[in-house]
Image (spheres, rainbow, N blue to C red):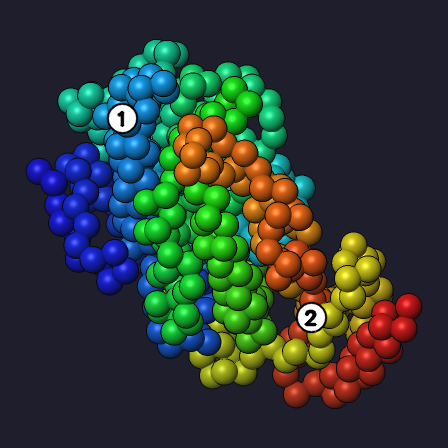
Amino acid sequence: MAKVFNDPIHGHIELPPLLVKIIDTPQFQRLRKIKQLGGGYYVFPGASHNRFEHSVGVGHLAGELVKALRAKQLEEPSLNSESLINDRDVLCVQIAGLCHDLGHGPFSHVFDGMFNPQADPNGEKWEHEDASILMFDHLVDDNKLTPVMNEYGLITEGDNENDLVFIKEMIKGSVKNNSPLNELYKGRNNEKSFLYEIVANKQNGIDVDKFDYFARDCHHLGIQNNFDHRRFIVFARVCNVDGQLHICSRDKEMANLYDMFHTRNSLHRRAYQHRVKMAVEIMIKDALLKADQDKHFIKWAEGKACCLSKAKKHKEAYTKLTDEVIEQILHYGACSSTPSSLEEAAQIIQRIMRRDLYQLVGEIKLKKKDQEKAEDVTKRLKAELAKVIPKDGKQDENDNFEVKVAKFDYGKNNEDPISNYTYFYSKFNPTIGFKIKPEEVSNLRPECFSEKHIRVYWKRRNDKRLEDAKKCFEAVKKEVEEN
């Protein structure tokens, strides 16, 4: 039977029985042990929420949006509304929303965005969405849910509108280009392409994943959220845009959508890329890299073990990978009788506990004309700071400092996601979507949509070379500002 959850953000929400069965599995319950904001909890005392409740919220909102779209289409006989969104589609969209974050590793984006690129620099590009698909397959197989899905009307075999394929395609995200849908997706035909915009919309970034984490993160961080996702759902509808169906919003809702992207930018500045949070996450990353040297750190069956960076290739191992890895590091480090990489990892974690964090040497805010020079400035900083390190062969830059680029934008680099990628409809023609020209947007619209700050962190405590590092940094900063 359906189950009611009392959520602090969305109130009492009711999820269908199949979603409840998915929630009641070890693979999904694992999300209770992964912090939504990674190292943010070490800076914001209220940021204790986890991927579990966020995923439940996204599953709920995905259902709310797709049902609202279906209700509006029933009013439009010209769009073949009865077959446009059926019960199978609704259930699949809800499952995709629920399972979209199954693949997050320890401390969320610390694992896939910071640890993995350094631990496996020569490996193929890997994102948490890839792991979510891996974990979804594991969840379905390990809990024998295929026949259960069939009982609820889902099609799990064959090539024609296979619902398992459709769910995984939605988790991966909608297309970024204008290629025909049938060349990229197999789960649904071209007529239903708009369904891919609900959970992970790579076209313009307007999706229920953001709706939930904006509201949830703001609530726990104590930051005001100016975007009203409920109003967006009320005014959203499927419209024809040059022969392709897209989710469109009412033209008068443009200001509400700008509020959404402004909220995104504000959260990145005030929380997601907070200077101290970034220091903590660099330390967690460094500890994980030290622990990764232990080839048998993750054990998932008798005689089976691997290092941290290899766990993403093993479903059973990845299931065991949560924020609790920190406690494992501290335990193994304390039990080690001889110096080891795990002991070094434990020492870094203990520094976090004592608030002995990496120090911010300085920050360079790049000018508008210099935004594309971030990589060059980063290389210049590394080259100058490397001169401070003793040439004894025992240390390198990773032991002494880290240069990080903090990027603030509206999600589309330096482009306006509203005027360039978002479709609207008018009150007088609600079935046809169109873009709003930049000149028709408010004069208060930002002129620049991207900004980069380059930060330098010094890792060694009570280090006399810190002053030398600051002098090197100031010299490069002055050079950048004068050019």
Q: Position of residue 321 (x, y in %)?
A: 39, 51
- Left/right of residue 89 with respect to residue 21 in the rendered view: right
**Within 10 angstroms of label 1, few (less than 14), some, or many (20 or more) residues?**
some
Q: Secondary structure at mark 1?
A: loop
Q: Position of residue 102 (x, y in %)?
A: 37, 44
Q: Which residue is mark 2?
A: 455
Q: Amino acid at mark 2?
A: Arg
**Residue under the point 63% across and 42% down:** 437
- Left/right of residue 15 with respect to residue 351 in the rendered view: left
Which tag, 1 or 2, sits closer to the chain's start?
A: 1
Between residue 268 and residue 386, name the one nearer to us.
268
Between residue 5 and residue 462, name the one nearer to us.
5
- Left/right of residue 270 with respect to residue 19 in the rendered view: right
- Disc number at residue 74? 1
**Residue under the point 60% across and 56% down:** 442
Q: Quadrant of residue 283?
A: bottom right
4 in relation to 70, above or below: below
Q: Amino acid at mark 1?
A: Leu
**Residue under the point 12% across and 45% down:** 3
Spot the residue most to the left: 1
| Circle nearer the viewer, 1 or 2 | 1
**Within 10 angstroms of label 2, few (less than 14), some, or many (20 or more) residues?**
many
Q: Position of residue 275 (x, y in %)?
A: 58, 74
- Disc number at residue 311? none
